Amino acid sequence: MEREKVIEVKDLVKKFGTFTANDHLTFDVYRGEIFGFLGANGAGKTTAMRILCGLSRPTSGKVTVAGIDASHRPEEIKKRIGYMSQRFSLYEDLTVRENIELYGGIYGMNMKEIVPRREALLERLSFTAYGDTLIGALPLGLRQKLAFAVAVFHEPGIVFLDEPTSGVDPVTRRQFWEMIYETASRGITVFVTTHYMDEAEYCDRITIMSEGRIVALDTPSALLSQYGTSSVEELFVKIARPQKTSV
Amino acid sequence: MKRFMAFVRKEFLHIFRDFRTLIILFGLPAAQILIFGYAVRTDLQNAGIAVLDNARDEVSKELTQKIEASEFFNIRRQLSSYDEIDATFRQGKIKAIIIFPERMASDIAREGKATVGIIADGAEPNTASLVTGYLTGILSDYSATLTKDITPAMPLINPEVRMYFNPNLESHFMFVPGVITLILILICALMTSVTIVREKEFGTMEVLLVSPLKPWQIIVGKVTPYFFLSLVNIIVILLMAWFVFGLPVKGSVALLIAECMLYILLGLSIGIMVSASTSKMENAIFISFLALMLPSILLSGFIFPIENMPKIYDYVSMVLPPRWFVDVIRAIMIKGAGFSYVWKETVILACMTMFFMVISSRKFKTRLGKGK
């Protein structure tokens, strides 16, 4: 079956001086997919993600995000994606509504578009009562959910989540993943990095990076049976921290 | 533009929602004006004086009246013996004691001179020198009239000291330009650097950078509110100077505002530069305060005249923007000078602005582009 590719990466190389952060990465991400990006710190996943988001440019190779070439028009990519970082991205001294207006505005929406969509969103999240509450007064779980809702508020083709659930309690993480599923079912591609291995199993496909290279890429269940492990955690330990000689 | 406006709106919300920021923005300038205007005055008003009149003749009485009549002094006590001097000073209310010698009038009549003792409270050196200066002035004034009466033919050297722009040596003429300089550096450099660094520290900068906003839009958007609020502040300060202290702008208000705008830009670019070099708010505050505020206060000639400093400080102060700006504002506000008098300083300030803008935009690019 031929699905629409929203991210195409071919032979991506990123070097900082003599250090190679990304060593010939090649992968595709399809529309509506939840794509997990795993790797230890320093494995190169942040570097790759920054290139995909249009924040930095590849040294060589071809990267296309939402049909845009990342080497030549990274600014165009920024208009078509959503982004949520592990660090909290909403302004605590603004209210829920003001935060939504701000991000809607930054992504080029005018108030006529923002207001109805904002109210619908608050309704859907049962947040209406909190609409004029300062973000700083909300509990962390609610903030994180709202941050995700804001990241996809402008209906981007792809949303990048950089360790979105770090520091969140299990119940909220569960709810958070329900939101991710719901988003993906609307056709928004979700590209997520995480270091919770149990979360990796929620993804449609996962990529495991080690020392700048991709060492595994498939659906979680295929990888588990391929390597004969019972959990992604085990799998990760097995292949992501190999001796220099392997793979 | 739509994106940019949404961003600027958020910046204003930040400012108006943060009580502390508002205090610094609007409370501080007003407080500074009032403090410098009323409390930290370097001119005299109703300084407490005690008189030890050993003469009790017409000359000493007349002099006492003259001193009392001046607005500078207020005679609080009449002493009757030298023994009281120590205790009087210890109470702290009396800034100086004036001692008239015995047989003062007859001495003057016979020998043509008499010596009046002035003892000032050296614990406050500034006040002490002012007090003695003013008292000496009154005495020589009086002796001049005496000399005329007694020996009109005798030529008398009578130094006449006169201040050209500030005849009453009123200190608030001097401090208003200083406060403007200080406030602008504070708001522009300190507050913008802090607000930019805050985005970095909270991680929101990352999200902004991934957004379609261009880096220059983020920076310009962050400093725009401070530009306008600084202008508002200047106007408030000028109005206060005018209505509270009766100090109008002698020169062109338009020129003054234009120079202030230039200086605001300068401050903002310094603030951006500071914010580009650190990602911790404490550092930003520390750098701004130590590198900008203190030199501005100490070396700009605002409080301590540069002419009185060792030459080396003079050279050091030349690289400090406030020094030139204080000169510009003083010239326009107090002397009523036009652009032809301040063009040199203006060019220097403009060059400094360009310099900092280039540096800070370079720094920002490398920071945001390549850094992790």
Image: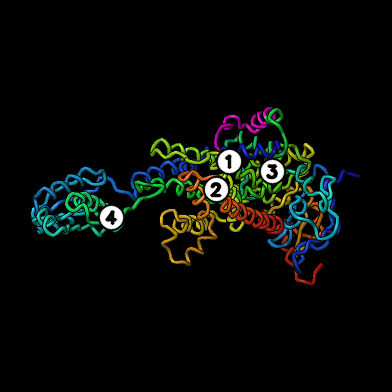
Around disc 3, counting alpha carbons within 10 Å, would you say few (fewer than 14), some (14 to 19), or many (20 or more)? some
Image-quadrant location for residue A216? bottom right
- Magenta span has A140? yes
Residue tagged 1: B225
Residue tagged 3: A177
Mark 4 belongs to which subunit? Answer: B
Helix or strand or loop: what does disc 4 sit on?
loop
Image position, residue B79 (x, y; %) = 11, 52
**Camera-side mark, 3 or 1:** 1
Instruction: Same chain for labels 4 and 3? Say yes or no.
Output: no
Helix or strand or loop: what does disc 1 sit on?
helix
Distance Cα–Cα, label 2 vs label 4: 50 Å
Name the residue located 55 percent from the left edge and 37 percent from the top edge. A134
Residue tagged 4: B158
Distance Cα–Cα, label 4 vs label 3: 92 Å
Image position, residue A110 (x, y; %) = 70, 31
Residue tagged 2: B188
* Residue A135 visible at all: no
Q: Quadrant of the N terminus of chain B?
A: top right
Q: Is residue A175 above or below residue B178?
A: above
SS assignment for the magenta stretch, majority: helix
Image-quadrant location for residue A2? top right
Helix or strand or loop: what does disc 2 sit on?
helix
Q: Amino acid at mark 3?
A: Trp
Mark 1 belongs to which subunit? Answer: B
- The residue stretch that appears in magenta: A115-142
Instruction: Same chain for labels 2 and 1? Say yes or no.
Output: yes
Name the residue located 65 percent from the left edge and 34 percent from the top edge. A101
**Camera-side mark, 4 or 3:** 4
* Residue B12 visible at all: yes
